[in-house]
Image: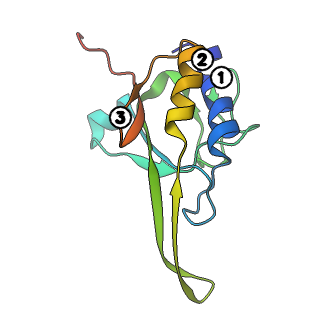
Amino acid sequence: MNTQEWIKFLDLCNEILGEGSHSLYLSESWCSWTTFDRILSDAGYWKCGLPRKGEYGDTGVFDGGTWGQPLEYSSIAHLIIPSKFEFADMYKGQFVYKETEQKILELSLKLQEERISHFISNWALELRLIPANV
């Protein structure tokens, strides 16, 4: 994906899914992502709300925002947006359960209009940026 596609993708995520947060309870959107370096290190994923408008620019995600660290777009290998996410835990002294449906089908249609390559299933919308034949 090029820079303009990343910016359009994140803009559409904010418009359709809502603003992300570090807190699962407070977040309107949720995703997990990994980088090419992380795949080689431990194959782990980070998880958090999607970056908010103003937290990303021409080269990537800025330091200190929702994702908490700077990240070049070109370093992202895989990003997953689940169709729903759940919070079940204590919040301000009370047990809270919250389930959030994400409008991934609506997002997929907008991404198709913008010709942004992605994969959609009942479970998630994905950006798979790992080349098949390397």
What numbered label is drawn on residue 8?
A: 1
- Type of amino acid under label 1: Lys
1 or 87, nearer to the observer:
87
- The residue sitting at 36% across, 43% down in the picture is 123
In the rendered structure, are the residues bearing label 1 and label 3 in contact, judged by CB atoms less than 8 Å apart? no
Above or below, 36 relative to 82:
above
Return the residue at label 2: 5
- Callout 3 amino acid: Ser
Residue 12 placement (x, y as % from top left) = 65, 31
Within 10 Å of disc 3 (Cα), the crowding (few <14, some 14-19, many 20+) is few
* Lateral position of residue 109 relative to residue 14, left or right: left
Q: Residues within 10 Å of mark 1 (few under 14, many from 20)?
A: some
Q: Is residue 116 left or right of residue 36?
A: right
Quadrant (top left, top right, bottom left, bottom right) of the C terminus: top left
Q: Which residue is mark 3?
A: 121
User: Which amino acid lies under the numbered mark 2 shown in the image of this protein?
Assistant: Glu
Q: CA distance from mark 1 to mark 3?
A: 21 Å
Q: Position of residue 92 (x, y in %)?
A: 63, 84
Report how far apart the C-alphas of labels 3 and 2 lie in the structure: 21 Å
Q: Secondary structure at mark 2?
A: helix
SS state under label 1:
helix
Q: Badges 3 and 2: C-beta atoms under 8 Å apart?
A: no
Mark number, residue 74: none
Along the polypeptide, which appears first: circle 1 or circle 3? 1
* Relative depth, front residue between 11 and 66: 11
